[in-house]
Image: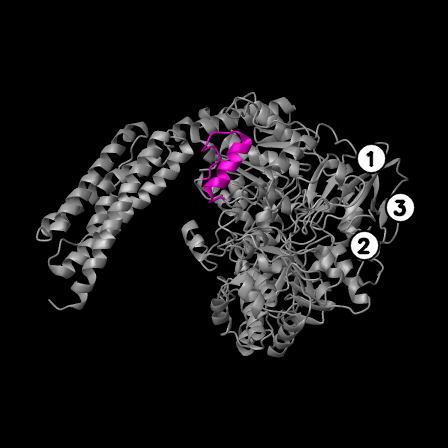
Amino acid sequence: MKNPPGSIDDLNHVRQTHDSIKEVWGQRTPHRGEWPVRKDERILEEPDEWIQSACLLCSNDCGLDIGVKDGKIVGVRGRVEDRVNKGRLGPKGLHGWIANQSSERLTKPLIRKNGKLEEVSWDEAMNLIVDRSREIRDKYTGNAFGFYTTGQLFIEEYYNIGIIGKAGLGTPHMDGNTRLCTATAAQALMETFGSDGQPGSYADIDVTDTIFLMGHNMASQQTVLWMRILDRLAGDDPPKLIVVDPRVTYSAEKADIHLAPKVGTNVALMNGILNLMIEAGNIDQDYINAHTTGFDKLKEIVSKWTPDKVESVTGVPADQLKQTAKIIGTTSTLFSTVLQGVYQSMQATAAACQVNNMHLLRGLIGKHGSGILQMNGQPTAQNTRETGDDGALPAFRNWDNPDHIAELEKLWNVEHGTVPGWVPPTHAMQIFRYAEQGSIKMLWIVATNPAVSLPELGRIRKILSKEDLFVVVNDAFLTETAELADVVLPAALWGEKTGTYTNTDRTVHISYKAIDSPGEAKSDLNIFLDYAKRMDFRDKDGDPLLKWNDPESTFEAWKKCTVGKLVDYTGITYEKLTGGSGIQWPCNEDHPEGTERLYEDSNFRTYPDICENYGHDLVTGAVITPQEYKAKGYNGKAILKEVDYQPPHEIPDDEYPLCLTTGRVVYHFHTRTKTARSQELNNAAPDVFVQISEEEAEKYGVSKGDKLEIQSRRGKAQGPALIGDIIPGHVFMPFHYGYWDNPGRPRAANELTITEWDPVSKQPYYKYAAVKIRKIEEYSRPEESEHEGLGEKIIKRIKKMGSDEQGQIRPVQEEKVAEKEKEKIHIADYIGLIHQSEQQLEQAFKDVAEHHKEEPDVYAACNLLASWSKIHYGKIEKFKDHYSEHKENEPQDLRKEIFHGPRSGGVGLVRDLHDLWLLANESHISWIVLLQAAKSLRDKELESVCEECDQQNRRQMAWILTRIKQAAPQALVVPS
């Protein structure tokens, strides 16, 4: 890699307020109250002009200006008027812009021909994408498309992608890499408060008495926000700082109390804190009674978690736990943040909800100095959630609320049933599973690098390399993921396009285009507007589905989507965002200057008609139905969700005796696609490391810098040893490092991580995996590694698109025709299944009727219900030929296994009815499955048949259950 402009070779030309590599957090400006300004800058040449923007390298989104000279970025400076940073910038903000002018930028589209990526024109690339899209849609429906996006685009770009996916193609398979970092944040807020939307504000830090960082190494992850805390700690009347982390991080070093639990034990720890607060009476019972529900169940669960029990599970000393509970229970104000140490660990959503509970028990929410930030990891992660690109619906609408679906269809002017509201949205891990199984045929990946960032990388590379998966990648660089794509589209970076984005505490910033993109690179907004035009997506009146053509008009369209919602942008304009500070939503006529914190009136978003989610069982992830939710009567009260501790699903054993956890370093962002192209940032953290405790170092005979190999059941990685500052039995590796710049050895932490996720938020578990380590003399070359696909091998394409001798791409239907003849849609299986299920159910009803003639109601009802089943399989008969019915023997075998009657007597009748109910359930589930498929296919006739037959099927089940309830007491209790 060549040294880019601004590298250490050019330091003689640099003007900077401080060396942010050596002095990450700069000089202190002690305070309590208003945070003083401090203007940070780093400039290579005196700019001709300054362009307003905000940093795009963590979720803080610090306001900055871009210095431009001769069409190039030459520096940045912090905006002192911005509420988020008051002029400060961290090392990534001061150095990361160097990536824009890297010589390794993609400048032309690439298409894979004869197994190699070759430069082509935009027309050729887009025509191929459109041709494939149409072929796949026509053959497989919208369900064959998947979108995997990022946390780094602008609102305007996300909103277009969401409409294209949901209303243009009609796919539920849309998610982003925000699933890896912020999905639990959103879900925890929904579970407790009824909706996403961060309750707290950064301004709470300025006056709070206690700060609680749960699984959040803020010093490395949000450096400017950490500066704000450091300045409070250096000022008068500093707050108490409590940090929960198994490592002694920069954040933990400053803590009054550092709790270091074993990974995966967060729920046990939090239950212990809540228990001590309740036992001591350090709760606000009046607030609890007036504004929450669920206290008695919560109290019952946490009462088991005594300090000694917590210590035995977590390793946190009982005395430390008591000190923590006393501080939190008696503080007058409390500010808490939560991040990946919770979100990527066992019982993620459950643990995050317990932090919400901690605030609610004290009534410390919606007040100056008291707030919760379920933090984001990425700069625009909040916008993926707001616009619906993360599997949600835009503007915090409820996927399970038909009225909310109808609102969107009206707003977008599309036919009812266009938005796939009949099926739950697909999370990222399931999208890749569908691609692995072959039911997703086209995967569009935007500004993210799953070949380094997803768990179990060997599996991910194989998925991306499948012959039957058409992969499109938008990126500015040829990443490990782009190397495996069929089409790569060169994308504009920050500073090369205009748009808006929102940080963790709901502050919206504008970023103006400062320079042109290199070569033919385009913004993601323009790429997707072009795609929609070429696909000819239209609304029900025949007008273009996307009725705008630039960032500002797109933003105005987005504002209409937010009218009357919690996430209300209607009072924000490009003009209003220009020249001053970012603005916190909701911003509207009632709050024209924005809203600093939510829930000041303690009226939460738990009303059934406005809530974003009806909630889940925190243990199993099972959804709560709308009917169950309404029956709870939350209606504006926050929900205290209780949960008991469960141990991690993979724990150390004799073969793999250590527990791996992963995380970040201060100088890099995600997979280093941008930060590694700043020589100063890369020199500060050039390589992965393997951090072990002093106890492990002594046991294995390891010294600092020794070469280590770390191995799990899934793969291996290698790196130099770092000793100390982590609890015994644990190993830490940063996840940033892949292979594009150093293919010499396996070094990606995600070679080791597990393919498993939180049952509620579906966020992957990166914070525990059983591993073993050994000292090695030399690092292994990729070709010597037992693990496929590393280093140089990654650029040797496993899959090859079909091509003729001239290297032209063959269309989908011509690929391996002989093999494709075997391909079919599996709706045929269920048509055959339901046809036979209803035949078997008819016969079972007749058998019961005939055997229990002496029970007149049973005889009559069973014959009637048998006739219904006959009608059902008669109605499905006509679809067998249309969908090429695939016969199954399962229903007949199932009847033999389940239905053991008919039997005699009262108990015999109960047993026969019991078996009937089980058989009827088989039909019921089959009708539900078939109905979902019918909706996806837009087959209104089949959909109508499924709904009608399932309605009668439910009536069959209801009669059976009613009759069982009537017969059971007499048959089982009274001797006969």
- Residue under label 3: 14
Residue in the foreground of this view, choosing between 269 and 969: 969
- What secondary structure is marked by label 1? strand
- Residue under label 1: 72
Question: Number of callouts in the render?
Answer: 3
Q: Is residue 739 left or right of residue 348?
A: right
> Decide: marks 3, 2 in contact (CB < 8 A)?
no
**Up-down: is 383 above or below 971?**
above
Mark 2 residue type: Ile
The magenta stretch spans residue 416: yes
Q: Separation of disc 3 and disc 2 at Cα?
A: 14 Å
Percent of width and height locating residue 894 = 24, 48
Q: Earlier in the sequence, mark 3 or mark 1?
A: 3
Disc on res. 21: 2
Which corner quadrant holds the C terminus? bottom left
Q: Is residue 830 left or right of residue 650?
A: left
